[in-house]
Image (cartoon, grey):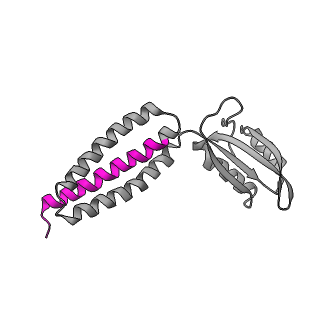
């Protein structure tokens, strides 16, 4: 049977790994978004937590529970880091929409409510189609996706990160949506 100190140690390893891997996930995303100084600070904290957790495990390799908790902490840290990143929703994205249901009306509606929309014609398997391109804050993605889904639940939609933006029209809420 494990004693209380061993259980506390295993839990500390688990939570230290959850924290350092979550920080690592956010750090990489922040770095990709061009915020290198914030990424540096996060990297400093991450490395300290990592070394403390690793040191604790290495000094107690005779306890396989510590090794398992180290691995589980890593796994859960990835999940937690993903949730944190989704909530932060830092930066901008570009959404491309191909709708067979009145794409020009959809374009006009999106412009009315504040989205900057650029359109062009693209050739697909079944002929020419209008492609709508919308750049917006990642925080606004769910709102735009809801509008598109209500308009045409069969629309083809792709979402890409836009590392940097300059000029143009980026979504600003003007009125309540449908």
Does 67 sit above or below residue 165?
below
Side (left or right) of 115 relative to 55: right
Residue 100 visible in this rendered orientation of the protein: yes
Q: Magenta residues?
A: 1-29
Q: Is residue 112 magenta?
A: no
Side (left or right) of 82 relative to 42: right
What is the chief secondary structure element of the magenta stretch?
helix
The spot of residue 175 in percent (x, y) is: 69, 38
Q: Is residue 28 magenta?
A: yes
Side (left or right) of 101 relative to 51: right
The spot of residue 100 in percent (x, y) is: 82, 57
Q: Residue furthest bottom?
A: 1
The spot of residue 2 in percent (x, y) is: 14, 66
Does 162 sit above or below residue 103?
above
Q: Residue furthest right?
A: 127
Does 34 sit above or below residue 147?
above
Does 54 sit above or below residue 125?
above
Question: Which of the 4 image quadrants contains residue 1?
Answer: bottom left
Image point (61%, 34%), residue name:
164
The spot of residue 148 in percent (x, y) is: 71, 52
Residue 178 visible in this rendered orientation of the protein: no
Q: How many marks?
A: 0
Image point (13%, 58%), residue name:
5
Image point (48%, 47%), residue name:
85
Q: Residue furthest top?
A: 167
């Amino acid at each position: 049977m494990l004693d209380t100190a061993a259980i506390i140690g295993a839990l500390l390893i688990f939570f230290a790994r959850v924290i350092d891997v979550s920080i690592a996930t956010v750090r990489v995303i922040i770095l990709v978004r061009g915020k290198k100084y914030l990424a540096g600070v996060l990297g400093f904290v991450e490395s300290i937590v990592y070394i403390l957790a690793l040191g604790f495990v290495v000094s107690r390799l005779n306890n396989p529970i510590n090794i398992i908790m180290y691995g589980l902490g890593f796994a859960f840290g990835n999940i937690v880091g993903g949730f944190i990143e989704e909530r932060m929703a830092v930066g901008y994205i570009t959404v491309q929409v191909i709708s067979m249901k009145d794409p020009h009306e959809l374009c006009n509606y999106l412009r009315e409510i504040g989205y900057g929309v650029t359109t062009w014609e693209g050739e697909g398997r079944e002929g020419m189609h209008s492609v709508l391109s919308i750049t917006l804050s990642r925080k606004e993605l769910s709102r735009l996706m809801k509008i598109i889904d209500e308009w045409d639940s069969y629309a083809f939609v792709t979402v890409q990160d836009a590392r940097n933006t300059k000029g143009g029209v980026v979504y600003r809420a003007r009125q309540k949506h449908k």
